[in-house]
Amino acid sequence: MTKKVVRPRIQDREERKPKYFHNLVKKVEQRKWEQEIVYERKLVKERSKEDHLYADKDKFVTSAYKKKLAEQAKWMEGERLPQLREEKDDVTRKRDLSDFYLNLGKNGCIWGE
């Protein structure tokens, strides 16, 4: 009798997946990208201080670095769009209540019903 009760619990534990783990993985990836971008900006500032020493030399960029820069630009664009939407919908910057009433209409909250 106890084997029948214990076995489904074990199977239930095997089938479960972490609820919030994928969110943590996304945040780790986001922070990694942000840290890389900050590091690259720091390097650019340091290089700009020494540019006058190497002004007459040719600059070479590897294809891997170009690919990395393209990925960073793509990631930055993907992060910029939600920020623009958020800034557009920011309630503290609104002057009147027209957007409030418009949002009420979209959500189906109509006065008198």
Image (cartoon, rainbow, N blue to C red):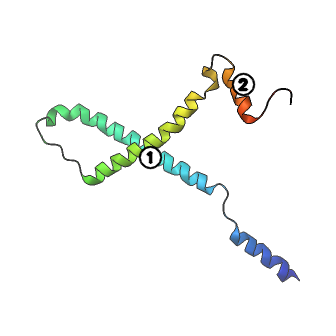
Instruction: Mark yes or no: residue 36 visible.
Output: no
Front: mark 1 or 2 = 2
Percent x, y for residue 4?
84, 81
Q: Quadrant of residue 25?
A: bottom right
Q: Nearer the viewer, residue 83 or 1?
A: 83
Q: Earlier in the sequence, mark 1 or mark 2?
A: 1
Asked if residue 111 is positioned above or below residue 34 in the image, the reply reads above
Local packing at callout 1 (Cα closer than 10 Å; few below 14, some 14-19, many 20+) is some
Q: Position of residue 10 (x, y in %)?
A: 75, 74
Identified by mark 2, the residue type is: Tyr
Left or right of 32 in this view: 61: left
* Res 112 visible: yes
The amino acid on which the numbered mark 1 sits, given as a three-letter code, is Trp
Instruction: Pick the quarter of the image with the C terminus.
Output: top right
- Which structural element holds mark 1? helix
Q: Which residue is mark 2?
A: 101
**Few, some or many C-alpha atoms within 10 Å of disc 2 (few <14, some 14-19, many ≥20)?**
few
Residue for point 80% across, 29% down? 110
> Position of 112 compared to 34: left or right?
right
Residue under the image location 35 percent in, 37 percent down: 41
Q: Position of residue 97 (x, y in %)?
A: 69, 19
Horizontally, is 59 left or right of 97 in the view? left
67 vs 18, nearest the viewer: 67
Q: Could you tell me which secondary element the residue under label 2 belongs to?
A: helix
Q: Which residue is mark 1?
A: 33
Residue at image location 53% in from the left, 34% down from the top: 83
* In the image, residue 111 above or below residue 46: above
